Amino acid sequence: AAAPDGGILHHTPTRNPEGTSMIRHAARGGLLFALIAAAVSTTAYAQTGAGDRVFYRDKKFGPVPQTATGEVKEGPGGIKVVSAGKTVADLSPADVIKIVPGSDLPGLTQAVIFELDGMENRKEYAKARKGYEDAAAAAAANPKTKKYVDFRLAILKAKMYDEADDKVRAAEQPGLIQALEGFLLSNPKTWEAWPVGRTLARLQFEKGDFDKARRTWGQLAKNADLPKDLQTEAGLNEVDNLIRAGDFAGAAARAADVAKAAPPAGAVRDRLAIYAKAAEAGAGNPATGAAEIEKLIAASKDPAVRGTGYAMIGELALAAGKPRDAMWAFLWVEVVFNADREEVGRAMTRLTKVFETLGEADKAELYRERLRKFRAAA
């Protein structure tokens, strides 16, 4: 994990191809990535005339965004795209990237919709932001248009935030978090609640507000309009943040609750076992937890589960006042067991804090910059 001279080794993140849930783990930041990667021209949109255009992920095609065109029907569990009376796509909120309306919205013409989307695809973010802000002011009276514009604007701001330097991020962070919180409060039962909630929880985590991140995940976990697998994933992240906040009793209770609806075997169960062991050790003697978690890591062949295990070893080391041990654990997540991109981001965030605690300001600064580049590349 670390070079003999004390330098940090660079790495190339790996991808775990096993199953849709792992694809979603690996694409945590994929909403922001695909707003850029799914660059289809404004002219192409205008020529289809066949309805809304939905950009989404499909595990068969890896990171390449797919599209479906037709009438979008939103309901519990996600959205359906219907064309000529047939469902051409049935999508989970975790797989939807964006929807570009194929007709005017009240107060927002199709031409402006295409123009703003084209700006994003061309990475003209400042121009697109100004355009969405103008559109938001003009269309505030219509709920459907307001939801569309507020979502696109919030996610665009998050992308710009991720690419900005520390000075800009410090100025933008409060307003961005407020915008995401406001959207989630106003639109709790829409497909956009999932990508907005994930982004909000991640920003709260990076800020060190683990309790607020836990509450955001808790809101998603209780959202009956989300698919069961996403509710479960939100519950797992709720447990994760309880442990990082030092609420080990609360983490144990929540893990037991999530386990009631969890599959009998697989990655979810393995992660729950790691969280339960981390909560038990944290409530007792955090210094003794690593050995037991290492046994669970060894028993799993899933690199994402192993990443969770080393993340928890790192948290227990911090709780035991051993930041150097925590450093090694988080480096295992970043460099070796890096199948889950969001777990890697969390590890890099914690490494920044660890190096600050160790008084190694140069490495803390290095990790702040590496984390910025990591998020910007998502």
Image (cartoon, rainbow, N blue to C red):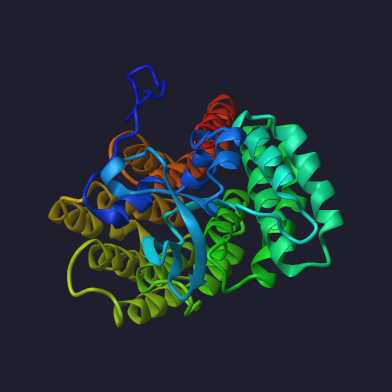
Q: Position of residue 78 (x, y in %)?
A: 45, 67
Vertical arrangement, residue 240 with respect to residue 127, above or below: below
Residue at x-position 75% and y-position 50%: 109
Q: Evaluate whether residue 354 shows in this view.
A: no
Vertical arrangement, residue 198 with respect to residue 129, above or below: below
Q: Is residue 287 left or right of residue 111?
A: left
Residue at x-position 44% and y-position 63%: 82
**86 vs 206, nearest the viewer:** 86
Residue at x-position 23% and y-position 73%: 263
State how many labels appear: 0
Q: Position of residue 95 (x, y in %)?
A: 42, 55
**269 vs 117, nearest the viewer:** 117
Q: Position of residue 351 (x, y in %)?
A: 48, 39
Q: Is residue 50 left or right of residue 135?
A: left
Vertical arrangement, residue 36 with respect to residue 16, above or below: above
Q: Quadrant of the N terminus?
A: top left
Q: Is residue 122 left or right of residue 54?
A: right
Q: Position of residue 61 (x, y in %)?
A: 30, 41
Residue at x-position 41% and y-position 39%: 327
Q: Evaluate whether residue 55 shows in this view.
A: yes
Residue, far top: 5
**331 vs 218, nearest the viewer:** 218
